């Protein structure tokens, strides 16, 4: 199975659907317990104050069925049962059936408590999806309609049925219309609230990512400021050391010169690390999106690799735009980082793929390696600042984090797909209407 991630680690929570289903079912069980006690109290009050008796044994037997179903569902949930939507759906269908039976024993369609069908439809719209809601709406309409048939077919009420048939039909149609409108508007409201919650969660995650980016940038700026002076001093000392070594006799001169070159190389490496840390992805100092031929962008990306590595990169560009509008230096840096990760993860003789495609208003740059893939726990942390599986000194763990920041600054996203034994694919998606200037015909 392919694992995927498109948010920063630490920001993912339990699956929204599973969490919502559990909360909805637990809440529904509480509502049903309240309904059991409320119906029991209503039956006893009506029996005490009405001029005719009620079939208490039958009514309380029906209430007992409702209470037993609620207890069994609560036990199922408490023992770790999966809160499938069908559990809540079947409970509400049972409630509609029990309500129909109670109404049939207490006046049928003329019982004013038939309005409670709408309560169950509303509950279904709140805790279930549209399919279950409309199914329960139809079930409630059938139950209510069966009460009319009961009134019309009673042998000792033909005269009443004759006078009330038109009235009962109108009541049924009115109920059907009210139930449909209730289901529709509550479903719309529920879905709008869900969409607003998702938007709020995305905004919160986006804000958290930018806060992390600001923290990394501040750290880099502070490190560059604090280390610039000692690094400059080391550079001067190394240069003086090389001049002094040059005056020494052989063979000591060659050995010390090698050490001097090593110091100089490591010094340049420290400066390069500080430069990469200080580069704020998507917001480089003074860089604006500019029109750039896609071919030139890819050539510049491949040119950053030595020949032995660039020949291992297979570039595929089916139906890609001719020209894109991007911050070129930042996008090249991001692509180089993704390709470098892919080359390092793949066996030495294998190739990696850079595929550039477009569709549905998106430009996609997909890098696939031939490596061993990532375990789910590693994939879950991929993109976290300063997290890396490379040996010490081989990487800072900022590449994926800054690439995702760049994508979001341009209105896109970074998606990672990986599975043990299947390699890893990183897809950088950018909105085509912002990046494409012209498209090949």
Image (cartoon, rainbow, N blue to C red):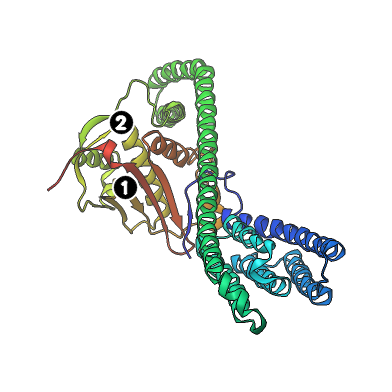
Q: Nearer the viewer, residue 79 or 319?
A: 79
Mark 1 lies on a secondary structure that is strand
- Image quarter for residue 151? bottom right
Q: Quadrant of residue 97?
A: bottom right
Q: Position of residue 149 (x, y in %)?
A: 58, 77
Residue 28 point in image, percent of width and height: 69, 59
Q: Dot 2 lies on which element? A: loop
Q: Earlier in the sequence, mark 1 or mark 2?
A: 2
Q: Position of residue 60 (x, y in %)?
A: 81, 72
Residue farthest bottom in this picture:
155
Question: Which residue position holds label 1?
Answer: 365
Q: Residue at x 37, y 37 (%)?
A: 411
Residue denoted by label 2: 327
Q: Nearer the viewer, residue 403 or 132?
A: 132
Q: In the rendered view, would you say 310 is above or below 369?
A: above
Residue at horizontal 75 percent and vertical 70 percent from the top: 66
Q: How dense is the environment of label 2, judged by Cα within 10 Å: few (below 14), some, or many (20 and up)?
A: many
Q: CA distance from mark 1 to mark 2?
A: 15 Å
Quadrant of the rendered structure where residue 432 is? top left
Q: How many marks?
A: 2
Residue 208 spot, x, y in % from top left: 55, 35
Image check: 31 left or right of 280? right
> In the orientation shown, which residue stands out farthest toward the right?
48
């Amino acid at each position: 199975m392919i694992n995927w991630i498109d948010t920063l680690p630490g920001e993912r929570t339990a699956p929204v659907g599973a969490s919502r289903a559990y909360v909805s079912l637990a809440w529904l069980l509480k509502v049903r317990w309240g309904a059991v006690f409320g119906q029991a109290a209503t039956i006893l009050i009506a029996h005490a104050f009405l001029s005719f008796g009620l079939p208490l044994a039958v009514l309380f037997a029906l209430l007992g069925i409702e209470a037993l179903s609620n207890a069994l569902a609560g036990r199922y949930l408490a023992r770790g049962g999966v809160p499938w939507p069908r559990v809540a759906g079947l409970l509400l269908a049972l409630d509609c059936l029990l309500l129909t039976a109670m109404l049939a024993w207490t006046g049928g369609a003329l019982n004013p408590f038939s309005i409670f069908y709408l309560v169950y439809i509303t509950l279904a719209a709140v805790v279930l999806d549209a399919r279950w809601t409309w199914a329960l709406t139809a079930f409630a309409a059938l139950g209510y309609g069966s009460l009319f048939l009961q009134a019309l077919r009673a042998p000792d009420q033909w005269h009443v049925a004759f006078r009330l048939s038109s009235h009962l039909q109108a009541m049924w149609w009115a109920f059907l219309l009210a139930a449909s409108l209730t289901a529709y508007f509550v479903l719309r409201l529920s879905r709008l609230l869900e969409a607003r919650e998702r938007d709020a969660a995305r905004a919160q995650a986006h804000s958290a990512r930018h806060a992390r980016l600001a923290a990394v940038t501040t750290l880099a700026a502070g490190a560059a400021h604090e280390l610039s002076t000692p690094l400059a001093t080391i550079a001067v000392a190394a240069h003086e050391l090389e001049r002094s070594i040059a005056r020494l006799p052989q063979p000591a001169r060659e050995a010390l010169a090698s050490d001097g070159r090593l110091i100089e190389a490591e010094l340049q490496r420290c400066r390069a690390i500080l430069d990469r840390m200080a580069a704020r992805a998507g917001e480089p100092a003074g860089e604006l999106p500019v029109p750039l031929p896609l071919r030139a962008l890819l050539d510049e990306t491949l040119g950053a690799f030595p020949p032995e590595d660039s020949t291992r990169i297979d570039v595929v560009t089916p139906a890609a735009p001719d020209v894109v509008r991007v911050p070129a230096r930042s996008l090249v840096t991001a692509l180089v980082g993704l390709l470098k990760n892919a080359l390092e993860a793949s066996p030495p003789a294998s190739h990696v793929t850079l595929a550039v495609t477009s569709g549905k208003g998106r430009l996609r740059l997909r890098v696939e390696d031939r490596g061993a893939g990532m375990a789910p726990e590693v994939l879950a942390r991929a993109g976290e600042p300063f997290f890396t599986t490379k040996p010490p000194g081989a990487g800072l763990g900022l590449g994926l984090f800054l690439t995702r920041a760049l994508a979001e600054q341009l209105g896109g996203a970074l998606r990672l797909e990986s599975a043990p034994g299947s390699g890893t694919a990183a897809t950088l998606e950018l909105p085509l209407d912002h990046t494409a200037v012209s498209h090949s015909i």
